[in-house]
Amino acid sequence: MEGGFNKHHLLGIRELLPSEIEFILNTADAMKEISFRDIKKVPTLRGKTVITFFYEPSTRTRTSFEIAAKRLSADTINISASTSSLVKGESLLDTARNLQAMQPDILIIRHPHAGAPHFLAKHINTAVINAGDGMHEHPTQALLDAMSIKEKKGTIEGLEIAIIGDITHSRVARSDILLFTKLRAKVRVAGPPTLIPPYIENLGAKVCPCIEDALEGADVVIALRVQRERLKQVLFPDLREYAIRFGLNKKRLALTKKDAVLMHPGPVNWGVELDPEVMDLERTIILNQVTNGVAVRMAILVLVAG
Amino acid sequence: MKLIIKSGRVIDPTQNRDEIGDILIENGVIKEIGQNIPAEGAEIIDAQNKIVCPGLIDVHVHLREPGFEYKETIETGVKAAVAGGFTAVCCMANTNPVNDNQEITRYIFKKAKELCLARVYPIGAVSKGLEGKELAPIGELKEAGVIALSDDGNPIYDSGFLRRALEYAKYFNLPIISHAEDKGLAPDGVINEGLMSTSLGLPGIPAVAEEIMVFRDIKLAELTGWHVHIAHVSCAGSVELIRQAKAKGIRVTAETCPHYFTLTEEAVKDFNTNAKVSPPLRTATDVKAVRKGLKDGTIDVIATDHAPHHPLEKETTFEDAPSGLIGLETSLPISLKLVEEGFLTWSELINKMSCYPAKIFNLDGGSLKPGSVADVTIIDPEVSYRIDVNQFYSKGRNCPFHGWEVKGKVAMTIVGGQVVYREN
């Protein structure tokens, strides 16, 4: 296949060429079928050791990576911040060097600080996969978003993609914007102005003054999670006002193209960024995203191990 | 004890002097300056093809002792200073314990005097424990020898407190050095708010966080009639505010650092923690404005804000890494780029790195006039080399200029008539 993927790590979408993204997506397409077999296991990564190292809570991403690794026959070990020596004050560098000394093949890391995977990649030889770093990137989420869109739309190129909500604190938004623009879609963002970061246009997104403008004629709508832990700040008055002013419901979604799809990286605050009335619409493909997440992560594991 | 520096290009802005000549030093003071001074009985230093100027003075360094000796000690700090051409440094109060009492001030003096290298002038805390709540014993600090007051690192948030501090410090003739930053605008900020912060997903600090406090400090200087020195000016808005204040005759002076007129926020790409500094590196527009401020006299002083950290402290994520970079051993060659580019003259640069610091903080040195202390820096302006942090005397390695090609090297540093550093 043209291009291929020759990187040792997956740190972010920024580092990827459009051809590499396409290659990963095609590999993921091929992987997807494995999850629908009776015996969901192939020997591809037999004898490989995969560590998931999560400094932040996660259900979906962590389980998804673990399932992906297991379906490829890798041995998986899970470490979380609360059960690791981090609580004894061990530094990130020391922890990584010690893990490396046990010869794992792949280290999947989620960390509250931007650049943590990049830091590890500088210091250890093990392949590093970024499972979300602070507000910076979440590349496998963007890849599974792209896979889910392609399944419904056939292509990414030329689509109008609206991302709604807290852009400032969202690593998903950053990776999505980078990926979609690399594949020549048009990205619009909207949300409370307190949650739109400066210079986001330079990443390739157009800022719409109101969410209705962003939704108008969109092919894809991605709602972002309201990060409740940030409510103590003064970014918006309360959840009720957020739901009324910025939440997505049937009425607002009627502004999009008829066949537009609705996505969300999860976990959803139903009744805040999404009205429960949209949960079971045909256009709502949130669970497809989760299914595709396993396929994308299988593809990434195979490619970085290769 | 006589020393004669022969045939150097002697540049002393305090005498409007820039010509080939000799300097005779006797008993630690400048005895004579002129042509063909007889050399009998004196040690001769050949300064042919070299610049001879008043010793460089850095009014903003962190020597880390007492309390953080693993980052730097007074000894390693002043060794770095003399190797960088500095004959005197002023050290900030954020040690542990804080320099908010005479014991610490005297301890620093004692350590520095034992070394007999660069002069060390302690800066006292404005507030006890740098907490911005209670005044430090300013009279006691003055008596122990501090040359200024600052809560550097902890911006003074309470305007009423700073007002009283200025009024009180005026009585003791101690300027207050302000780290101007409104933390409320960026409680978690680690880099300039802008393209890089958005792109890297790092919490930003907008330039207005500095500008608002610069404006406040200027107004308080005006109200109290006392001298505020703005530390490490990083952005265009601050330069403009200081320019206006000076035009109105308000008692304000300002410094910037080599990194603020050389680097932009681009330097933090790839999460380079050695470019994490407070205030943060800004944009090309700001760099241009800071340079203009240097040229037109709005910014009086080039200081370094030399802030050593242990290499392991910087070996972590950007958000976890401490702020600060070292500058004593790179300040001169990086600043000389302004001369090389024709942006500043040699005299202008020496003013900002020696004469004005001495004048503003009422320090010895900063002049080669007969009778002045014999603090002299001799520079070889033609030597090109590559900056290598592994060659530094400082314990710090947190230098964003590692690997840079530079021109101009310190050949010799003389303090009180003693050669304290000689390039081998």
Image: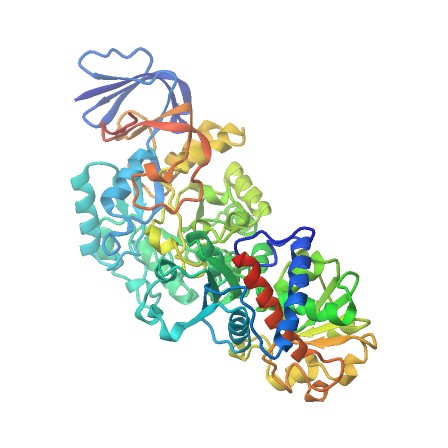
Residue drawn at x 47%, y 44% is B259
Residue B203: tell me if it is visible: no
- x then y, percent, for residue B144: 20, 51
Q: Is residue A139 left or right of residue A250?
A: left
- Display coloring: rainbow
- x then y, percent, for residue B34: 33, 16
Residue drawn at x 23%, y 12% is B39
- x then y, percent, for residue B239: 53, 48
Query: Quarter of the image containing the C terminus of chain B?
Result: top left
Q: Place residue B14 in its image quadrant.
A: top left
Q: Is residue B253 left or right of residue B366?
A: right
Q: Is residue B302 above or below residue A13?
A: above
Q: How many marks?
A: 0
Residue B291: tell me if it is visible: yes
Residue drawn at x 61%, y 58% is A13
- x then y, percent, for residue A24: 64, 60
Query: Quarter of the image containing the N terminus of chain B?
Result: top left
Q: Is residue A210 left or right of residue B218?
A: right
